[in-house]
Amino acid sequence: MQTTSSTRLKLGVLGSGSGSNMQSILDAIAAGTLNAEVRLVLADVPDARILERARNHGVPGAWLDCAPFKTKLDGAAEQRCIQMLRDADVDTVVLAGFMRIVKPGLLAAFPNRVLNIHPALLPAFPGLQAWSQALAYGAKVAGCTVHFVDAGTDTGPIIIQRSVPVLEDDTPESLHARIQVEEHRAYPEALRLLSENRLTVTGRRVVIS
Ligand code: GRF
């Protein structure tokens, strides 16, 4: 069997909700298929389930108060976030259901090391509730995208995409659930490629070696 050398990723996770994607990353680490450790979890919602999951795994977690902003991570909160990630010796930032726009300050602090997962086949359906957008549009195929984050919203270079069919009787919930099954495979896979130094960003394109 061919073995690929890898660098152990030091992950900081930002989330707002359930944290099922972070769970899939923790599970891949535990299964030995991803060379990484989750060093810090930050949530902008004090009682977010993602913090409970972190606690259950003995991972340090904290509420990040992002006031006065409602939809972005900016200003003093951004600076505190960067400091906490640095103090935890994080080298890669994983957005996992983080419902805020990240701004250039965070991106500059972790250049080319901020990743996001989006529940659509970008560039189709950026923004909120992408699965509902796909359903309302009448798309026959939906899916998820793991990408590097740039200054735009859901516009960064694409690392991995996985598709799922849209079924005749789908509801927003059933379609999102099907997409999430693929998300939970795609995010650990993208991080594994990063840890194996197999991702090269050339302009808009991510070449996987
Ligand atoms: C996922 O569908 C992800 O694509 C989107 O937000 C959702 C987060 O789910 N960005 P979870 O918190 O990881 O369960």
Image: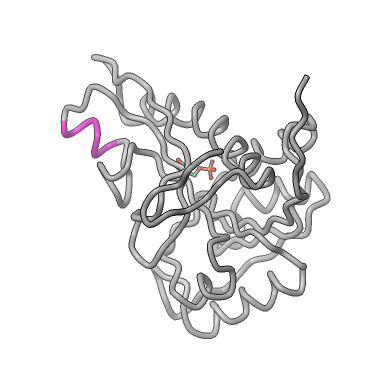
Residue 176 lies in what quarter of the image? top left
The one of 58 and 96 positioned closer to us in this rendering: 96
The one of 64 and 138 positioned closer to us in this rendering: 138
Residue 73, horizontal then vertical, whole percent: 47, 72
Q: Quadrant of the C terminus?
A: top right
Q: Magenta part of the protein: which range?
A: 132-137
Residue 91, horizontal then vertical, whole percent: 69, 63
In this view, 112 is above or below 128: below
Residue at far top of view: 168
In this view, 180 is above or below 84: above
Q: Quadrant of the N terminus?
A: top right
Residue 87, horizontal then vertical, whole percent: 76, 74
Q: Is 195 included in the stretch rendered in magenta?
A: no
Residue drawn where x is 50% and y is 34% of the image: 183
Residue drawn where x is 75% and y is 24% of the image: 2
The one of 27 and 190 positioned closer to us in this rendering: 190
